[in-house]
C-alpha cells in the first residue's frame, strides 16, 4: 500500500513538473540581455575581438565556435583583453552588423574615417580584429537504431567536416597581418546493445583548438 | 490543458526593442518625426483559416526604435502627432512609412528558425514640404528554434534582430545618401556665409 502511494505521489509530481515546463514554454519573455550594457576592460592592456562572418546567409559561422576560440585564447593570453563578440557588436553598433560590417581592410579604413568609430576603438584599446569564416557541416549519416521498452539495438554512424579560416586585421597598421585555415573531418559512432553508447568525433572542438593555437602563434609573432 | 490548447492555437504578441545605443555623428539639425498611423499603430493580424489566429503588435516597438536611432543622429528631435504640427523652425521632417511586414513560424516553413521581415520607406522633407530624399530600408531577422522556446518568444527575438538591422541600415544609408549629403553641405555653406 505504501509503495502504491509512493508511486502515485511520484506520478503526480512528475505530471505537475511536465505541466509546469509546458506552461513555461508558452510564457512570453523578451530579450534577456540588455544591449546597452557598459563594457568593462582593463585599459592598460591591448584588446582583441573574435568576430564570426555572418553575411553569407545559411553558412554563418556558429556562435559557439567563436566563443570556443575566445575561451581558448583566454587560456593562452593573460596580457590581452578578449572582448566578447556580442559586447563588441553592441559597443560598435551599427558598424559591425551583418549588413554593415567591413568585408575588406579598405572597408574598415572607410569606416574608421568616422571620428566616433575611431574614438570608440581607441576607448576599447583595440589592437586586432579576428574574423572567422566557415562552419561545421554533416557530410554523411548511415545505420539505424530501434528502441523498445526492453532497450535499444542497432548501429548508427555520421561524419562531420569543419572548414574554417581566420583573417587577422591589425587595427593600427590597417592591414591583414595573417590568415589561417583549419580543416578537420571525423566520424562518430553510436552502437546500441540495450543502451546506446556514443563514441563522438569532436570535430568542431578539435578545429577550434587547432585554430586557437595557430592564432596564438601568429599574435605572438 | 485548456491553456496549452490556447497556446497552440493563438499567437498574440507585442514585439519589444532591445537595440544598443547608436554610434553616430550628430547632425546639427532640428528634426520633426511624423509617424503615420499605419506605422504608429501597426499590428499584423492574420485571418483564421485553420483556427490559428495571429495578432502581432509592432507599432510601439517601431516608434521606440526609430525615436532612439534618430535621437542619436540629430542635435534635436521631436515627434509630431500631425504633419500640420511641423514648425518652420524644424530643419527637416522625417516620415517613416512601414510598407510591408512578414512573419513566419518554423511550423509553417519547416525551417529551424522564426523569421521577421519589414520594408520601410523614409521620406525626408524640409518644413515647407519640399522633398529632399526618399529611400527604402528593410530589416530581416531570424531566431533559432530551441527547446522550450515558445512562438511568442521566437517571434519577439526575430523581430528584435530585424529592428536591429533596420536601425543599422538606416544610420548608414542616411549618411551615405547623396541628396542628403548635398543638403547638408549647402546648409554648411549657408551657415559659414552668414
Image (cartoon, coloured by chain):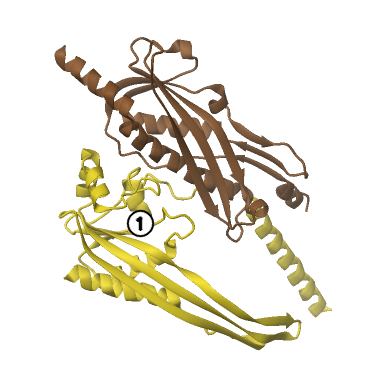
Chain colours: A yellow, B brown
* Left or right for A213, reference B44: left
Above or below, comparing residue B194 to residue B169 in the picture: above
- How many labels, in total? 1
* Left or right for B106, reference A60: right
Q: Residue at x 49, y 32 (%)?
A: B120
* Left or right for A26, reference B186: right
Residue A198 visible from this viewpoint: no
Please name whichever residue, A184 or A199, is drawn nearer the observer in this view of the structure. Answer: A184
- x%, y% of residue A193? 66, 90
Please name whichever residue, A64 or A144, is drawn nearer the observer in this view of the structure. Answer: A144
Local packing at callout 1 (Cα closer than 10 Å; few below 14, some 14-19, many 20+) is: some
Q: Residue at x 27, y 33 (%)?
A: B25
Q: Which quadrant is the C terminus of chain B positioned in?
A: top left
- The residue that disc 1 covers is A85
Instruction: Classify mark 1: helix, strand or loop.
Output: helix
Q: Residue at x 22, y 47 (%)?
A: A109
Q: Chain of mark 1?
A: A
Extreme-bottom residue of the structure: A193
Residue B105 visible from this viewpoint: yes
Above or below, comparing residue A193 to residue B176 in the picture: below
Q: Residue at x 52, y 50 (%)?
A: B142
- x%, y% of residue A140? 55, 76
Above or below, comparing residue A10 to residue A177 in the picture: below
- x%, y% of residue B13? 62, 41
Please name whichever residue, B114 or A185, is drawn nearer the observer in this view of the structure. Answer: A185
Image quarter of residue A150: bottom right
- x%, y% of residue A38? 32, 47
Extreme-right residue of the structure: A1
Above or below, comparing residue B106 to residue B194 in the picture: below
Amino acid at each position: 500500500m505504501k509503495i502504491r502511494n509512493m508511486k502515485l505521489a511520484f506520478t503526480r509530481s512528475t505530471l505537475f513538473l511536465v505541466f509546469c515546463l509546458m506552461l513555461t514554454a508558452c510564457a512570453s519573455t523578451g530579450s534577456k540581455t540588455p544591449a546597452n550594457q557598459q563594457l568593462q576592460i582593463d585599459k592598460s592592456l591591448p584588446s582583441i575581438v573574435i568576430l564570426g562572418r555572418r553575411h553569407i546567409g545559411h553558412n554563418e559561422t556558429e556562435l559557439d565556435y567563436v566563443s570556443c576560440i575566445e575561451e581558448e585564447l583566454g587560456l593562452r593570453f593573460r596580457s590581452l583583453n578578449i572582448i566578447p563578440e556580442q559586447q563588441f557588436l553592441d559597443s560598435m553598433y551599427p558598424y559591425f552588423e551583418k549588413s554593415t560590417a567591413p568585408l575588406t581592410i579598405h572597408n574598415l579604413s572607410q569606416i574608421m574615417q568616422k571620428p566616433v568609430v575611431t574614438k570608440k576603438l581607441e576607448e576599447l584599446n583595440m589592437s586586432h580584429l579576428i574574423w572567422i569564416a566557415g562552419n561545421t557541416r554533416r557530410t554523411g549519416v548511415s545505420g539505424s537504431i530501434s528502441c523498445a521498452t526492453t532497450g535499444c539495438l542497432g548501429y548508427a554512424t555520421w561524419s562531420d567536416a569543419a572548414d574554417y579560416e581566420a583573417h587577422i586585421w591589425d587595427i593600427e597598421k590597417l592591414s591583414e597581418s595573417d590568415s589561417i585555415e583549419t580543416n578537420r573531418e571525423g566520424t562518430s559512432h553510436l552502437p546500441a546493445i540495450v543502451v546506446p553508447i556514443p563514441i563522438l568525433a569532436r570535430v568542431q572542438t578539435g578545429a577550434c583548438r587547432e585554430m586557437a593555437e595557430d592564432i596564438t602563434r601568429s599574435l605572438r609573432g | 490543458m485548456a491553456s496549452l490548447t490556447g497556446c497552440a492555437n493563438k499567437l498574440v504578441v507585442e514585439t519589444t526593442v532591445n537595440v544598443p545605443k547608436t554610434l553616430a555623428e550628430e547632425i546639427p539639425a532640428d528634426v520633426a518625426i511624423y509617424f503615420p498611423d499605419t506605422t504608429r499603430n501597426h499590428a499584423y493580424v492574420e485571418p483564421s483559416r485553420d483556427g490559428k489566429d495571429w495578432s502581432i503588435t509592432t507599432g510601439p516597438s517601431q516608434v521606440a526604435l526609430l525615436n532612439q536611432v534618430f535621437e542619436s543622429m540629430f542635435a534635436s528631435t521631436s515627434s509630431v502627432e500631425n504633419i500640420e504640427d511641423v514648425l518652420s523652425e524644424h530643419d527637416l521632417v522625417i516620415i517613416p512609412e512601414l510598407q510591408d511586414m512578414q512573419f513566419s513560424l518554423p511550423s509553417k516553413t519547416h525551417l529551424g528558425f522564426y523569421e521577421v521581415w519589414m520594408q520601410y520607406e523614409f521620406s525626408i522633407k524640409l518644413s515647407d514640404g519640399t522633398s529632399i530624399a526618399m529611400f527604402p530600408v528593410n530589416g530581416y531577422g531570424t531566431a533559432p528554434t530551441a527547446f522550450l522556446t515558445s512562438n511568442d518568444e521566437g517571434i519577439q527575438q526575430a523581430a528584435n534582430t530585424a529592428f536591429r538591422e533596420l536601425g543599422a541600415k538606416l544610420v548608414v544609408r542616411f549618411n551615405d545618401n547623396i541628396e542628403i549629403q548635398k543638403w547638408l553641405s549647402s546648409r554648411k555653406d549657408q551657415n559659414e556665409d552668414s
